[in-house]
Amino acid sequence: MPLETFKSSQPLTLGVELELQLVNSHDMDLSSSANDLLELLRRKPFPGVVTPEMTQSMIEVATDVQTEHGPLLAQLQTMRDTLVTAGDRLNIEIAGGGTHPFQRWFEQRIFSKPRFQELSGLYGYLAKQFTVFGQHVHVGCPSADDALFLLHALNRYVPHFIALSASSPFSQGVDTLFDSARLNSVFAFPLSGRAPFVLRWDEFAEVYFTKMESTGVVKSMKDFYWDIRPKPEYGTIELRVCDTPLTVERAAGLACYLQALCRHLLERNEAPPEEDDYLVYTYNRFQACRFGLEGQMVNPKTRERIGIREDILATLRQLQPHAVALNAQGAMDEIERTAGRDGNHASYLRRRYAQTGSVQGVVRASVDALRRGPG
């Protein structure tokens, strides 16, 4: 079946999806409570979209199409408050974070939905190990070729988003030494990683996708777990490398940082993307996962080595005119505080572990951070 036509959308519109943890209030372990929570939320309109995810201990929420930081943040805050209130009625805590620090993957239950059951049958234990939690950001593209251009032009900035969003230092009860351990679970899937270097939609849809479909390996774009993938039905590209932050304020900041970056790239004042950009892609991505903002990356164009933190701060200065045009100064301030002062949420969780001496204390900190916001 041919790949559907790429639907043109308003440039630089945003949609944010957050995968969230459902946590038992008594022991801070994951709670297989998605059915109960979703049933309660169906009783009145939800300020966005809420859906089940792979296992019963997680849900996904999605915003409406947004254009600016203020309304996006306001909707995320309303969604958070609605979820927390519903969770309180069921004695369920809601938390961000890319991994749960001590859950046992083999105890997780696959959500009863045909696609999830099919994936469980295909991927075996990997499906339950996929109880990890990410933020996905959609950016509207005026054309399919613009979408592919942006997808590849963003390759050099992927370490920024991994390092800024990293919130998964703990897994199976131990500090992994990674700021983002979550992405190691994603990399285990055979269709993860980077998209093929194709810049024309007709070549992508009629040649690459047709060949892949003919192998029987894929049926739709949903079968690709790429770091960035096109979504023709929405007319967007979807960035998928971010851990779910602990606060919706950080989530909104990341989304609008991406929006400003895309606006800058669409001016096409930088050297265009090319296949050789990906020579350092896996190395840069590893550095961001392992060391977060303290990592080193190699600029694919200049071969210059620079700290990820320093590269983010330099990029923020370059994006200032775009932040003004997009009314995104609040988002840029959030990113600057993260990179320049506060650190990412992985460092925050490590500090809380040092204070409490327990992974249960880490989960408590995640729950509290979502409830109260920054501070």
Image: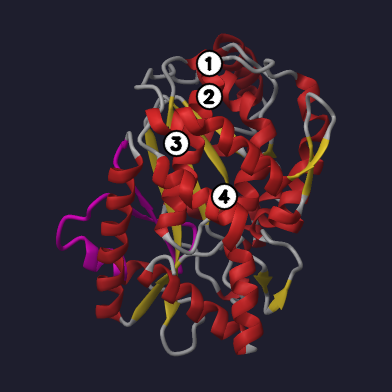
Is 70 in front, or is 173? Answer: 70
The residue pinned by badge 3 equals 138
The residue pinned by badge 2 equals 264
The residue pinned by badge 4 equals 242
Which element is circle 1 on? loop
**Marker disc for residue 299:** none
Q: Residue furthest left?
A: 44
Mark pair 4, 1: CA separation: 25 Å
The residue pinned by badge 1 equals 267
- Residue 297 against residue 120 in the figure, above or below: above
Which numbered mark, 2 or 4, is in the foreground of this view? 2
Which kind of residue does numbered mark 1 sit on?
A: Glu
Which element is circle 4 on? strand
Residue 244 at x, y percent in the picture: 51, 57
Give whichever of discs 2 and 3 has the lower sequence position: 3
In the rendered structure, which segment of residues is drawn in magenta? 37-66
